[in-house]
Image (spheres, grey):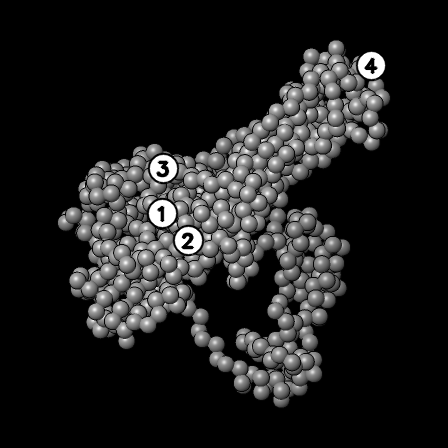
Amino acid sequence: MGENLVIVESPAKAKTIGKFLGEGFTVKSSFGHIRDLASNTLSVDLENGYEPNYVISDDKKKVVSELKSLSKKASVIWLASDEDREGEAIAWHLSEALKLDPAKIKRIVFHEITKEAIESAVESPREIDMNLVMAQQARRVLDRIVGFQLSPLLWKKVKPKLSAGRVQSVAVRLIVEREREILAFIPKSQFKIEGLFHPDGVKASIKVKAEIPEKFEGEKEALSILDSCKNTSFKIVSVEEKDAKRSPSPPFTTSTLQQEASRKLGFSLNQTMRVAQSLYESGHITYMRTDSVNLSKLALGTAKQVVTDLYGKEYSKTRQYSTKSKGAQEAHEAIRPTYLSNIEIEGSPQEKKLYNLIWKRTVASQMADASILRTEIAIGSENLSSRFTATADRVKFDGFLKVYTESSDEDQEESAAAFNLPELKEGQKMNVINITASEKFTQKPPRYSEASLVKKLEELGIGRPSTYAPTISTIVQRGYVTKDNRPGFERSCKVFTLEKETISNSTIKEKWGAEKGRLFPEDIGMLVTDFLVENFESELDYGFTAKVEEQFDIVAQGKLKWNKLIDDFYKPFSKKVEETLQESRPKNAERELGIDPNTGKKVIVRLGRFGPLAQIGDSEDPEKRFVSLAKGQLLETITLKEALQLFALPRTIGEYKEKEVIASSGRFGPYIKYNGKFISLPKEYSPYTVELDTAATIIEESIKKEQQKQIKSFPEEGIDILNGRFGPYIKKGKQNYKIPKGKDPASLDLESVLKIIEESPDKPAKKR
């Protein structure tokens, strides 16, 4: 082998780097961290400076053995892990676990995997930055201490098998507090008044839509406005034209990439980071964990050339953005394509989409401002003190808008403005076509999406680019929060219309409350948050959590000893844990709702072993009945009526073809049970109200589907040939077998089927 051993974190990165280094270099992967704190113990020596006890995990022992063997033969070991704190820590752990000779170690970093960047890194190696390593160690040790101190406390005071974390508990708190804002919110009715006008002296087809900017309380006030609009003439009171400019957003940081990929592509945070990692390791983009919006001089020059070549010189404007996020760490570049001249790349559909987003954002950041002419007209009459206004934006020069427009967190209500205003002048008469007063309700605060939660955490200075995705994944996996869609409800809204001097009224149905991909707290998340806020208010304070992040940054700068940071936190924290253990009462999640009219027994809701449930009868009652709460129901808001309705299931609907039909709900949603089979109930039907005729139709459809599923059967051998999601397959017992391409499933005989089964490779046992 060559004299040089290069160690990186991933096989994909090793493959890409190997192409650039060529002969004389052996590139190997450590497959991420090779050692960590032991999982089954605290692994932190609280008595001796909080020294961590690191162990090599079982699944990495073979990798470590191979790397040790290779490192002994190499004269130079290049540690080429990522350029952030996590990467620096991996490099240090490698040097420690492999017992490398410091004289043989060379640490290299690069923020893009290109031939130029790799060669430049090799020409200017450095030593492992122990300040960065200790900053990462401080985070790891502090998080382990918090987890190991709080989790047993939660087991005793709330519920077994719970866990808590320094950043995750704060994230759950944000979601819980937003939920309580929503629960306390009372929608207020207001009326929005809009007018549709035809300007005098122009074609009849030209119409201008305008609205009164203020909202009006109650229908009496709205009707008064409409009355004032009767038998009166309207004219244009003013026409104003203003030039405006729009500037592009800066290139992507980790959090802004996560937010935009969520809004524009529908990617989850984990999905975004996984795809970005793949793009980076393939050499398509720069390093994807960064707080920085800076671009290198080379990137700025390339961007100028690309913009000029593709769109023309007038579209180019070189910009260097400065990073404003709290505690931005390490002087990285923003996320950008490594070669801006590559408009498209080879890769998976997800990789192509994310690369395209990054390319557009980067190129747009180096383009000219958009020039916009904003026209605003005011329409008024002598009888009316309020004025109708219409606004239109006309793009005079599109600039960066030619390539990219940033999306927003919340859906914007469509404006009543006309976007193509005709030529209008002051004093011009405006003929009324109709004027409407529509009832609108004030909107509740929006629940967090993954993207908006990341934005909020970043605003508060909590967490870092590498922590957002795992934090949100953790709180979902642990059942504190659920990511869900809710269908919303219909409500009636009044509409009053003035047309030809007559006011008519009508009612329209409006859908409200529908939410997609939002984060909802579960009962256990609310309970744990209440307990922690009550007993550890300062530790769950947003400002305190952000201050700890700032201290990690100070450690990274070498201005604070890592174990001093831990000590300042641990001593008051452990004392508080001890006091809470002694003094705090267990948090009992139980509410009495009232009395069951049928039995006269108490109805309570509580947190059970398998989640929230409703119960009829005391805990000592041998005939007590209980049922799980439905999806979306919370212990603190469920009503007696809603709880009693849960006991109506399972519900016997009747008989179909002399067999009983039962409607109920289970782990996977509402269903119909018929002839020993469970058939999912479509979303538009409720198990509480579905009728026998509807159920019979659903049953027949299910039977028909089942019949179509079976292509052929060999009952004596217990073998079926079936249609599946991914095409026809053979099923024998619990095993499925793929049918080779080119074979017609319907024409297979028993001998052919047995041969396919015999020749099929054995499937490896699935790892847990």
Give the residue type at disc 1.
His
Q: Position of residue 205 (x, y in %)?
A: 82, 31
Q: In 3D space, how far apart are the residues under numbered discs 1 and 3 (Cα atoms)? A: 15 Å
Instruction: For the residues labelled 1 and 2, say whether their Cβ atoms are less than 8 Å apart.
Output: yes
- Mark 1 or mark 3: whose residue is earlier in sequence: 3
For residue 79, side relative to residue 390 (left or right):
left
Mark 2 residue crowding within 10 angstroms, few (<14) / some (14–19) / many (20+): many
Q: In 3D space, how far apart are the residues under numbered discs 4 and 2 (Cα atoms)? A: 66 Å
Residue 536 in view in this figure: no
Relative to residue 673, is residue 537 depicted above or below? Answer: above
For residue 320, side relative to residue 629 (left or right):
left
Farthest bottom residue in view: 751
Instruction: Tell me the quarter of the picture where residue 488 sits.
Output: top right
Residue depth check, mark 3 versus mark 4: number of the one nearer the observer = 3
Q: Which element carries disc 2, helix, strand or loop?
A: loop
Q: Read off the residue under disc 4.
A: 231
Q: Which element carries disc 4, helix, strand or loop?
A: loop
Q: Read off the residue under disc 2.
A: 286
Q: Position of residue 701 (x, y in %)?
A: 72, 62
Give the residue type at disc 2.
Thr
Instruction: For the residues labelled 1 and 4, say whether their Cβ atoms are less than 8 Å apart.
Output: no
Q: Which element carries disc 1, helix, strand or loop?
A: loop
- Mark 3 or mark 2: whose residue is earlier in sequence: 2
Q: Residue at x 73, y 17 (%)?
A: 426
Q: Nearer the viewer, residue 371 or 485?
A: 371
Q: Read off the residue under disc 1.
A: 332
